[in-house]
Amino acid sequence: MGTMFWVLEWLALLFVVVIGLALAAGLTMFVIDRTQTADAVRRNYPVIGRFRGLFTELGEFFRQYFFAMDREEMPFNRAQRDWIYRAADGRDNTVAFGSTRNLATPGTTIFMNAAFPPLGAQYARTEPLVIGAGAREPYMAPSFFNISGMSYGALSRPAVRALSHGARKAGVWMNTGEGGLSPFHLEGGCDIVFQIGTAKYGVRGPDGTLSDDKLREVAAHPQVRMFEIKLSQGAKPGKGGILPGPKVTKEIAAIRGIPAGEASESPNRHEEIDDWGDLLDVIAHVREVTGKPVGFKTAIGRIDPFAELFDLILHRGAESAPDFITIDGGEGGTGAAPMPLIDLVGMPIREALPRITDLRDQRGLHNRIRIVASGKLVNPGDVAWAICAGADFVTSARGFMFSLGCIQALKCNRNTCPTGITTHDPHLQKGLVPEDKADRVAQFAKCVIGEVETIAHSVGVAEPRQMRRRHVRIVQHDGRSVPMNEIYPSYSTRAAT
Ligand SMILES: Cc1cc2nc3c(=O)[nH]c(=O)nc-3n(C[C@H](O)[C@H](O)[C@H](O)COP(=O)(O)O)c2cc1C
């Protein structure tokens, strides 16, 4: 009995103390809110005004889980993400009952099934395609679907390791992004495309210009198959790479050749490349020094200047051409970018890709310059559309981030990524186990490739690269669909209707 009274007395005292502390905290907040001058809502509505900030922040998460419809969210909706998660699981990726897609939405792609599609025995393997046949070491690229550039810095160490191992397992290439080559890119043994960003991280001399010795060092790795000069990326044309200070660890600083802890901002373009002529000169130089195929990556603004590029190539001779051009749509992703650029600058891939491939094909350069396309091409239908439009290869960045477990928390720029993919905080990185995630990366890539092949068979051809614009229709504003070859009449014999 005595013990019970003693416990009750203590509980009563605890209750009074808790209430007292809560009142004291409320009073303190009231005084702080009333006297501060920075926030009008809190000044006018002390204490209660604080809930607005809290709910705004929490709303972001609640909407994703409870309120947003399957095909509503941006940049990627739940249907797109769930398809990737299921593909990465490597389990059954079929769905039941019927499509939840609204087929009347303008821009929707509808593939044209053949009356008599090929039988299983008539399916062909998607053959490797050569890039840079004229280089000393051409690259026979095995897969049409590959990993787009994301730097070690934007990505964490376990993320890069998982991608490297996963890429090798699936037989796809991995692009380093503009942060240089790390041991973690090499670790898995996959094919690597080395990206030369505007700051030339990893291949810069003491004066910050391109170093031939460093280029030779990078090219000496047999895994490094190609070099990509980055002119711009879709998420931020006109702005160089941005790595916030907290993400510039000692190791990342050493790989890039910059001071640790300070934000790393690349110039908005290569200082020595003022026009197409300069670009072709640098491409020829890098190809000569490294012996490997060299191309460039760009977002598309005006189309006319690209006609000038292809004309210049014809004038100088086809051997002067870039071995590939990566076209990144304005809807592309990034680790960090100013909002006006991420939202409003750069042509979407759905418009840019057919136009640029037409310019190339008009000049008979189809077999000389390979086109690589990126920009929210993460599900099989998107990849198949790009191949129909004229892409030789498709790459994805965020598709592979989802396969690593990304939940679209939109925190890549803050070093607080809850899934460990874009943070250098060791506690958060613990959640990302590279050995496990490598399998998911490989399974995602294989599933995309397999389902693009399924679409190809359904439209009546033996393998994806035989798909043409006539095989896909695009839904218009009046709800009717029109064949893509009527919207973008094609110039090449390859893409003839
Ligand atoms: C976290 C992150 C980092 C990126 N880093 C680079 C980079 O270093 N260089 C580059 O050219 N593009 C970079 N990108 C852009 C991607 O390579 C790609 O072009 C773009 O996201 C479109 O592909 P997606 O829609 O499949 O993500 C990055 C994208 C993300 C999401």
Image (tube, rainbow, N blue to C red):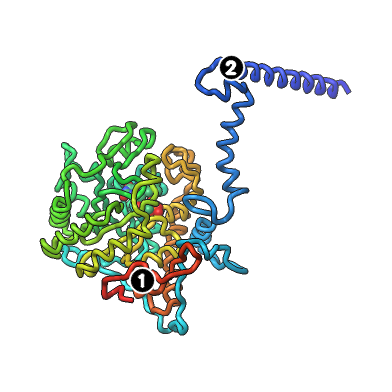
Residue 343, image x, y percentages: 40, 45
Residue shown at 55% from the left, 42% from the top: 60
**Left/right of residue 348 with respect to residue 458 in the rendered view:** left
Q: Which residue is identified by label 1?
A: 485
Residue 163 seen by the camera = no
Q: Which amino acid does the dot numbered 1 rest on?
A: Asn
Q: Residue furthest right?
A: 1
* Figure check: 235 above or below 314: above
Which residue sits at x=49%, y=59%?
A: 84
Q: Nearer the viewer, residue 236 or 203?
A: 236
Provide the secondary structure element on which disc 1 rests. Answer: helix
Q: Nearer the viewer, residue 489 or 337?
A: 489
* Residue that numbered label 2 is attached to: 34
Q: Please tell me whether mark 1 or mark 2 is closer to you in this view.
A: 1
Q: Earlier in the sequence, mark 1 or mark 2?
A: 2
Q: Position of residue 449 (x, y in %)?
A: 41, 67
Q: Residues within 10 Å of mark 2 (few under 14, many from 20)?
A: some
Q: Is residue 483 left or right of residue 353?
A: right
Cα–Cα span, label 1 and label 2: 65 Å
* Residue 32, image quadrant: top right
Q: Residue furthest front?
A: 478
Q: In the picture, residue 135 is in which quadrant?
A: bottom left
Residue 442, placed above or below residue 149? below
**Residue located at (51% from left, 60% from top):** 83
Image mark for residue 240: none
